[in-house]
Image (cartoon, grey):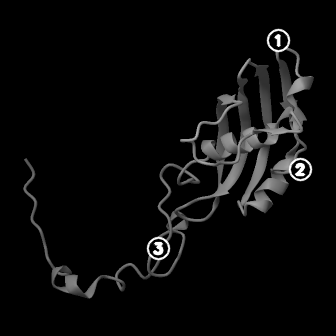
């Protein structure tokens, strides 16, 4: 369970119900809890439609917004647009071959409950890029001195060559232009 109370599926009408969440304070708590260093630039909005079925429940919706994450090359903040679809069916029965996992639905005292927050968090994490970048052409940090090369070249470029390649330092190549 994350932060939100579980909602009862028996309170959802047979034709389904639409839910809408726009609470940045919940996201801040989740980012802190999971040590994710990011900040909301445009509010993260979750729209969720809950459609009860005979043997489970179908969820569809979106998680949308914009966050700032540290660039994986230069560590400067970069903007990441989040726009991810939620399209999940959760069965009330779990087969023996399924691995135990934290599900967004649970049964307690004969009633089924669901966690919209867990669904939103799961899909938010899936929307995150593997390696966020501040810009597409980010040059990163100098491997020798740690200077951000996006702000200008550092002075250690010549000094940090691999000593095994020293013989190639003075090599001149004549190129024929044709």
Real-space CA distance between mark 1 and mark 2, rounded to the nearest whole angstrom: 31 Å
Q: Nearer the viewer, mark 2 or mark 3?
A: 2
Instruction: Tell me the number on the disc at residue 25.
Output: 2
Q: Which residue is mark 3?
A: 142
Real-space CA distance between mark 3 and mark 1, rounded to the nearest whole angstrom: 58 Å
Residue 109 location (% of width, % of height): 89, 38
Residue 13 location (% of width, % of height): 88, 16
Q: Nearer the viewer, residue 158 or 108?
A: 108
Q: Badge 2: few (under 14), some or many (20 or more) residues near its Cα, within 10 Å?
A: few
Residue 27 location (% of width, % of height): 81, 49
| Of pointers 1 and 2, the one earlier in the residue sequence | 1
Question: Residue at position x 44%, y 76% from top?
Answer: 143
Please say if 81 is above or below 48. below
Q: Badge 3: few (under 14), some or many (20 or more) residues near its Cα, within 10 Å?
A: some
Is 40 placed left or right of 12 in the picture? left
Q: Which residue is mark 1?
A: 15
């Amino acid at each position: 369970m994350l932060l939100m109370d579980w909602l009862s599926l028996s309170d959802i009408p047979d034709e389904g119900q639409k839910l809408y969440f726009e609470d940045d304070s919940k996201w801040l708590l989740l980012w802190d809890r999971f040590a994710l260093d990011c900040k909301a630039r445009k509010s993260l909005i979750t729209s969720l439609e809950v459609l009860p079925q005979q043997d489970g429940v179908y969820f569809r919706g979106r998680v949308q917004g914009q966050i700032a994450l540290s660039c994986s090359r230069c560590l400067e903040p970069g903007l990441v647009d989040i726009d991810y679809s939620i399209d999940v069916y959760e069965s009330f029965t779990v087969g023996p071959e399924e691995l135990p996992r934290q599900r967004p639905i649970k049964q307690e005292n004969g009633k089924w409950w669901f966690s919209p927050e867990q669904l939103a968090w799961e899909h938010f994490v899936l929307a995150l890029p593997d390696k966020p970048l501040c810009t597409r052409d980010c040059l990163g940090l100098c491997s020798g001195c740690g200077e951000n090369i996006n702000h200008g070249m550092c002075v250690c470029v010549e000094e940090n060559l691999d000593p095994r390649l020293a013989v190639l330092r003075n090599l001149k190549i004549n190129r024929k232009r044709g």
